[in-house]
Amino acid sequence: MRNSSFALILAALLATAACVPAFADERPGDPRHGKLVYQRYCLSCHGDLGNGQGEFAQWITPRPRDYRQGTFKWRSTPSGALPTVDDLEKTIRDGVYGTYMPTWFAIGHRARLDVIAYIQQFSDRWKTEKAEAGIEIPAEPPNDAASIDKGKKLYVALKCAQCHGDQGQADGVSAHELKDDWGNIIEPADLTATPSYKCGDTARDIYRVFMTGLNGTPMPSFVSQISKEDAWDLAHFIWSLRPGGANHPQPPAVGAVAGH
Amino acid sequence: MKTVREGLLSAAGLCILVVLASAPAHGFPAFARRTGLRCTSCHESWPVLNDFGRAFRDNGYQLRLGKDVPTENPFAFWPVAIRITPHYAYNTVTGQETDQGKKTLTTGGIADGAMDLLVGGNLNQNVSYLVVPTGFASDGAVSLESYWVYFTRPLADSDWLNIRVGKHEVDLPVSAHRSINLTNPYLIYGYHPAGDQDVAGVFSLGSNQRGVEVLGHDRGSFLRYSVSLFNANDSPGSRNAWDSPSAYGHVQKYWRLDSYGVSEVELGAFGAYAQYPTKTLTLNGQPLAGTGGDLRPSERYGLEGSILLGPAETPLRLELVLASGKDDKDLYQGAALRDGTWNGGFFEAIWVPPTDGLHWGIFGRYDYIRNSKQPLDVAKDTNDQDQFTIGVKYTLAFLNRDEYALHFEYSTDRMKRMAFDGSDLRVGTLFGGVDFAF
C-alpha cells in the first residue's frame, strides 16, 4: 500500500473531525454503557455492588460513596433531596479535592452521563422520588471587608466554630466526634489549609453548601436560619480563610505548636 | 551485495532476538497502589494509554487532589513495580544460508526473558521522576532504559510549559514502550535502507534519548505538543557542546465526539532530525570516543491519525501512522552513492469488546516499508518490508495492586530480496505467555 492511499484515509479522519459538532450526543445516559464505564474507572473504590466497599475503600478517608441510599453530599438541591444529573456530573468531572475522587474530565461528557445512569440503579430513590430542581442562588454581592466582617460574626452566632474551630482550623470541641450516616468517622473541613474546598473553589460553591447542607453528614442546611444576604456574608468570610484569602490567619509560632 | 545482505540478515536476526528477549515496558502498578485506581483507568487495553492515562502522565503522575506529594502517601508505600512476561516463543526463518544449503530454521522454547524494574512517582508537588533499570536476563546485563525528572508548571501556573530532563522516550504517535504487541517493533521508528549500516543504522525513534523535553497541553491533554532536544542514541559522541545535537517535535489534537458511533478522532504530526558524527580523531587507528565531527543527519517525518469507534470505554481504536525517512549518504562511511530514503507506516487496530469486566483485548497491525532511494547500487525494493501482527490478550485480574494477563500473538515479517540468494527473507513468531506487572 502506498502513502498516498493512507493520506486519503488521514484526510477522511480530518473531515470527520471537522464534523464534531454534528456528532454531539445529548441523549440521557445509558446504564448499559454506564456499567462498563463504572467497571473501568469506579470499581476499585465504589465496589461491584455500589456499596462503597471496593478493594481500595478500606485504606482511605473519607470513605467512597455508598450509592445504595441515594444520599449525596454535593448537590444544588434542597437538604435531603436527590442531586440533579448536573450535580453528579460536576462531582465526577471536577473530582473532590482532598479525597481520592479524581477529576474525570478526560473521559468525556457521554461517559459521565452513562455512568450516572448506572449509579442511579443502585438506589430505588431514583425510581420513587421526583427530581427536585436546584436552589436559586442570587447574584453575589460585593465580596468586601464589610461583608467578611459580618460573616465573621455569623460564624460565631451560628456556632460554626463548634466543629470547624475558632480559626476555621477543624479543631472545634466536636471536631473529633463526628460521624456520617454510615457510621464512619469524618472530620470537619479545615477552612484554612487548602486552596480548594471539596464543594468547589468559589464563594458561590460555599453559599450553596450553607443552603443545601451536606446530606449524610452533620453539616446541616441553614436555609431556614439565615437570609440570603447573611449566607453571602458567611460565604465571603469562609472564602477569606483560604490560603491567600483576605483574612487568612498567620501560622502560629513554633512555640505555640509545641505547647499545643 | 552479499555483504550487504549478510549484514542486514544479521541485523534482522539481532532485532528479533532483542525484541523477544526484551521485557515490554511500562505498565505501572505502583501508581495503582498509590491512587487506588485500577489499571483500566489509565490503560485502554493495558499497556496502551487512554485519555485519562495520557492526562495523568502529562500532569506528572499527579491527580491534583492535594495528595501528590510523597508525604501524603502511606508510609509503607514504595513506588516500585516489576513487569515481566514468561512466555513460549516459536520462531521460523526462511531462506537461511547454511553449509548444507538454503534452509528454513525453526526454534522454540520458553524464552530467556528480561524484566523492567519500574521506579517512579513524585518527588514533590509538580516534580515527578521515572527510573527504569531493564535487563536482568541470563546474560546479567542491566541498563537504564529511562531516568528523568519532570517539572510540571515550573514557570507559571500553566499546563503549557512542562520540562523533562534525562533519558526519556520521545513523545511518539504510538509509544514504542507501551505497545500492546510483544513481538515485532514498529518498523518506521528504527528502519534504515540497505547498506553498510555503520552509523546509518543506529538512530531509532523507539530508543530512549538523553536530553530535555518541553511539553505542553490543554486541560485533559486533548491538544498537546512536545519538543525534545537530545543526544542521538548510541552516538559515538562529537566535540560539540551538545554531543550529537538532535531534535524531535510532535503535536497532537484529539476531538472527543461523545458519540457511541465515533467517540474520538485524533490527528498529529511529528518529525525528528538526529545527527551523528562521520569523522573522529583516532588513537592507534581506533576512534576516540567524543571526538566526532562532520555531523550528518538521519531524519524522520510523519503524520498520524486515529479514530475510536464505539464508546470510548470499550473502543475499537484504529490508528494510522505514515512516515518518511532519510539517512545522509555520509553516514554510510563513504560506501553510499546517495542518501537513502524510504516511506512507510503502520495501521493498528485494538478492540476492547464490550464484555463484562473488560477482560479482552484483540489487536492487529500491519507495518510496511517501501524504499524510494537506495544508498547503494542495489534494487530499489531491496529490504522493502511487510509485517503483520495479530493477537489477543485476556486479562485474568485487574486489581489496584497488580494485573496479569494471558497473551497470544502471531507475527510475520517479509524482507524483500534479503535472503542470501536474493530471494525474500521471511521471519515468523508465535508467542504465548503470561504478561504480568506487580
Image (spheres, rainbow, N blue to C red):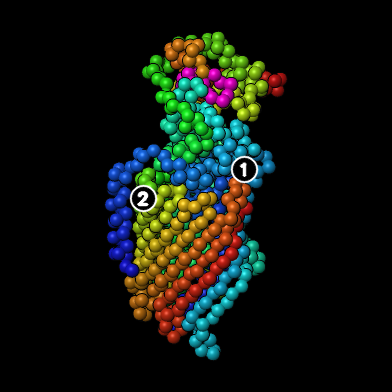
Q: Residue at x 66, y 17 (%)?
A: A173
- Residue beneath label 1, please? A55
| Label 1: chain letter | A
Q: Quadrant of the C terminus of chain A?
A: top right
Q: Quadrant of the N terminus of chain A?
A: bottom left
- How far is the residue under mark 1 from the one under mark 2? 33 Å
Look at the numbered disc 2 and give the secondary structure of its residue: strand
Q: Does the segment drawn in magenta span residue A217?
A: yes
Q: Does the segment drawn in magenta span residue A21?
A: no
Q: Nearer the viewer, residue B149 or A35?
A: A35
Amino acid carrying label 1: it is Glu
Q: For residue B18, say whether it is visible.
A: no
Q: Which segment did they paint magenta?
A: A206-220
- Is A151 situated above or below A127? above
- Residue beneath label 2, please? B262
Position of B206 with respect to B300 (left or right) is right
- Quarter of the image for residue A181 reads top right
Q: Position of residue B340 (x, y in %)?
A: 37, 71
Q: Residue at x 60, y 61 (%)?
A: B434
Q: Position of residue B278 (x, y in %)?
A: 44, 68
Q: Position of residue B240 (x, y in %)?
A: 46, 58
Amino acid carrying label 2: it is Val
Position of B328 with respect to B83 (left or right) is left
Name the residue at the front extreme.
A128
Q: Residue at x 68, y 42 (%)?
A: B76
Name the residue at the right extreme.
A259
Look at the numbered disc 1 and give the secondary structure of its residue: loop
**Around disc 1, counting alpha carbons within 10 Å, would you say few (fewer than 14), some (14 to 19), or many (20 or more)?**
some
- Is B426 situated above or below B130? below
